[in-house]
Image (tube, rainbow, N blue to C red):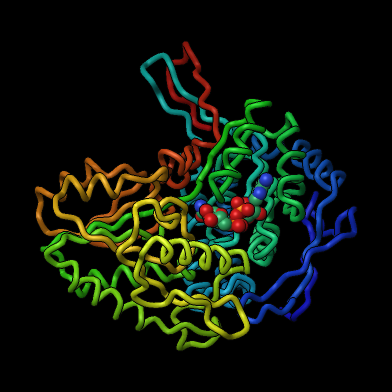
Amino acid sequence: MSANINYKLFINGTWRVGGSRADLPLLNPATEQEVGRVAVASASDLDDALMSAQASLPQWSNMPAEERGSLLIRAARILKAKAETAAAALSREQGKTLGEAKGEYARAVEMLEWNGAHAGKTSAPFPIDEKRIIVPEGIGLVAAFTPWNYPAVLNARKLGASIAAGCPVILKAAEETPSAGLYMIEALQEAGLPRGVVSLVFGNPPMISEHLLASPFVRAVSFTGSTPVGKQLAKIAAGNLQRCVLELGGHAPVVVFEDADLSKTAWAISEYKFECAGQSCNAPSRILVERSIYKEFLAKLVRAAEGIRVGAPDDPDTDMGPMANAKRIEAMERLTKDAVNRGANIETGGKRIPRPGFYWPPTIVSNIHPKSQVLHEEPFGPILTVAPFDTIEEAIEQANDTQYGLASYFFTESPEIQNRMIRSLAAGAVSMNHLKGVSADAPNAGIKQSGYGYEGGVEGVRAFQSLKLVNGVKAVSAQ
Ligand code: NAD
């Protein structure tokens, strides 16, 4: 892909520059240089997307689910064939390393494949008893909003589930990472997607969400992003009683008990935390360590973090690239300053790297005051806090002392402690002795201020279906 490409909108089966004729600059976070322009949707572009999606609905929702599944599997193959080129564009726009971007595209392909392979099953009628069946039906038009941190995976996750369910989708992808939308649309189009079923728009996020959600055609909203924006969308969606799937922020604790393998655990935390420069909702951010091993573990964690090679995303020796944008650097500066003003020690990192690009080093903060902002606001960057605990009760209390409830992790070999931690950690996902993100085949959702509504697995498709109860039938009819 050549530099300075203009990313267009995709509406009613064709690419267009948009009625507003306006565009936005696209920056490479590794250089802060402009590498392209992104089209901005006008209200009439959005109306066209709404009308064409609604017009596609009868044919699309009546297409046998297996056919929609085959389309997704073909799209997965096409995306896989273009993954090298797509990953290079993603790395250049987002700042993640080329290796991470390739890994992300591999997962995006899996998301399409899984939803494709299970489309027949997730739309098949199923019995309640001998005289009643449930017929899953697509809920109608979905408005999907994806962020810039994992745009390929999240586009695939939302589109895969909506398409499997038989819903048209208007995707507002992140303006910061438009290529992930472009490659997804190209793959779907080449796979035979009917006109109007999926639209791709960019522009002013609040204007787009307000316009789309004001339409009674939109029956469901799927958003991944920050908690404040998720709440705003839920409020607007209430006006038309649109169903919401909200995957919002996280502030994941990792509890390390004294019997854990300390070197392996420190290495695993460091590797997972600093992927995508820590800009992941599932990234660990608060490390709680049993006091007997606190000093030893902290030293190992600092060594592991200092071993992360920060550099240009396209350099094969780089482990961690820059942050995605200037706003994230400002957040790192603010959170670090606040922690230090309240008495924290910076064990490593803590200052912007003086070179062009949004580079912030792996940072570990200890001796942290309980009121520090970094303990309460999602850091969304390469900052880890480390604190000791004395009892399991204290560890559980500290781990759960957050408004978020997305992911949590712990390390111990003791079956008794394992059982207690699984039951006590307040999060949508709990991982034991390893760190793992979302997968195509399992439902995942946050609790508390991390959102609601499942993505992934059968439940992820159900999120875009209504379950029609049919009384008085004898057998389950094939679709
Ligand atoms: P943000 O909340 O401004 O934006 C996050 C995403 O939501 C972006 O893609 C943006 O385009 C979109 N968005 C913003 N306002 C919107 C609106 N009114 N309607 C529809 N979409 C809207 O935050 P940001 O500065 O881009 O990112 C920083 C924060 O966002 C982080 O601190 C983190 O909490 C959160 N975030 C979370 C995830 C996640 O995976 N859960 C992903 C990205 C960002």
- In this rendering, the answer to whether 417 lies above or below 259 is above
Q: Nearer the viewer, residue 388 or 22?
A: 388
Q: Nearer the viewer, residue 264 or 116?
A: 264
Q: Residue at x 60, y 34 (%)?
A: 234
> Which residue is most to the top?
472
Left or right of residue 56: residue 93 = left
Q: Residue at x 28, y 58 (%)?
A: 254
- In this rendering, the answer to whether 44 lies above or below 387 is above
Q: Residue at x 63, y 69 (%)?
A: 326
- In this rendering, the answer to whether 177 lies above or below 226 is below
Q: Residue at x 25, y 58 (%)?
A: 288
Q: Nearer the viewer, residue 368 or 427?
A: 368
Left or right of residue 287: residue 472 = right
Q: Nearer the viewer, residue 241 or 323?
A: 323
Residue 228 placement (x, y as % from top left): 57, 44
Residue 446 placement (x, y as % from top left): 42, 43
Q: Quadrant of residue 218?
A: top right
Residue 65 placement (x, y as % from top left): 56, 41
| Count of numbered badges drawn on the protein | 0
Residue 378 placement (x, y as % from top left): 46, 54
- In this rendering, the answer to whether 48 lies above or below 436 is above
Position of the N terminus by quadrant = bottom right
Q: Is residue 443 at least partly visible in the picture?
A: no
Q: Quadrant of residue 428?
A: top left
Q: Is residue 95 at least partly visible in the picture?
A: yes
